[in-house]
Amino acid sequence: MKRIYLQVLLSTLFLLAFSLAAFAQTAESIIENYIKAIGGAEKLAAVKSMVQEGTFDMPAQGLNGSYKRQTKAPDKMRVFIDLGVVQVSQGYDGKIGWAITPQGSGEVTGAQLEQFKMNAGVFPILNYKTSGNKYELLKNEKVGDVEALVVQMTTPGGIVIKTYYDSKSYLPIKSVSPQSEVTISDYKEVEGIKIPYKTVIKNLDQGLEFAITVTSVKFNVEINDSEFAKPAQQ
């Protein structure tokens, strides 16, 4: 069963960061309002790297541990999850995407590689005009008691993600793909930039749920490019 959990984790986790950077009263105007809401383009562009640390929990399976995500402009990222009995590490160095699980290590391809590319960099939202993605503004929906603006994004490879924005704050509160539903909350300001500290990911195929709680966010940390490279041997 642990192998199933890891496969589900690999297929859903990397939709997270991009869902936080999605896009909209036209789709484009909501993107711009979102960028302003979290701190503004100038402030975001000044962040060349980010390190987030926290906890990763799978309550139904009784698994919990640590979470660390490193990103570096313009196109690098790495995630490490340590659940004690299980460790997962994944990354993208600007060209190659890779993943390491107890079942082995290797490069990722196809749709999974496209997801890695989407999540690379610190604030990929800043590149929405040149991303090649298509954005469509859908009908407003309620998320709990919140009126949400709904924007559907389709990537060049055909990945479809719907992001729900609070109509008052323009902050993302939910994201849905064919495989997962992501709830985003507890925004806190770090050096003038709003970062979500709580994310719950539900896998719609397997019925599994993961919770990420961020406890630390640091900007402009020196990170060597080798941190993002595929490890030579595992």
Image (tube, rainbow, N blue to C red):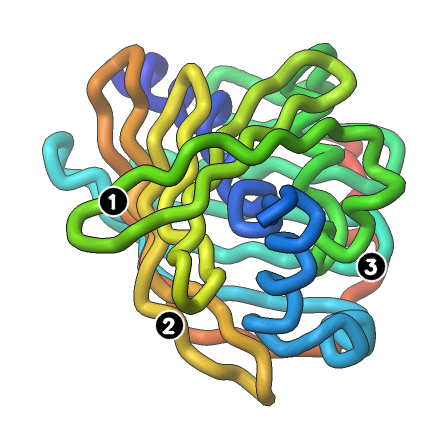
Name the kind of residue labelled 3 in the image: Ala
Whichever of labels 2 and 1 marks the residue nearer the N terminus, that label is: 1
Would you identify the image quadrant in which residue 230 lies? top right
User: Badge 2 local density, few (<14 within 10 Å), some, or many (20+)?
Assistant: few
At a point 56% along the width and 18% down the height, the residue shown is 104
User: Which residue is labeled 2 in the image?
Assistant: 215
Name the kind of residue labelled 1 in the image: Val
User: Which residue is labeled 3 in the image?
Assistant: 73
Q: Left or right: 103 with respect to 223? A: left
SS class, disc 3: loop
Q: Give the Cα distance between marks 3 and 1.
A: 32 Å
User: Badge 3 local density, few (<14 within 10 Å), some, or many (20+)?
Assistant: some
Q: Give the Cα distance between marks 2 and 3.
A: 22 Å
Whichever of labels 3 and 1 marks the residue nearer the N terminus, that label is: 3
Q: Is residue 7 above or below residue 92?
A: above
Q: Nearer the viewer, mark 2 or mark 3?
A: 3
Q: Position of residue 91 (x, y in %)?
A: 68, 39
At a point 67% along the width and 32% down the height, the residue shown is 135
Whether residue 194 is visible here, answered yes or no, is yes
Name the kind of residue labelled 2 in the image: Thr
SS class, disc 2: strand
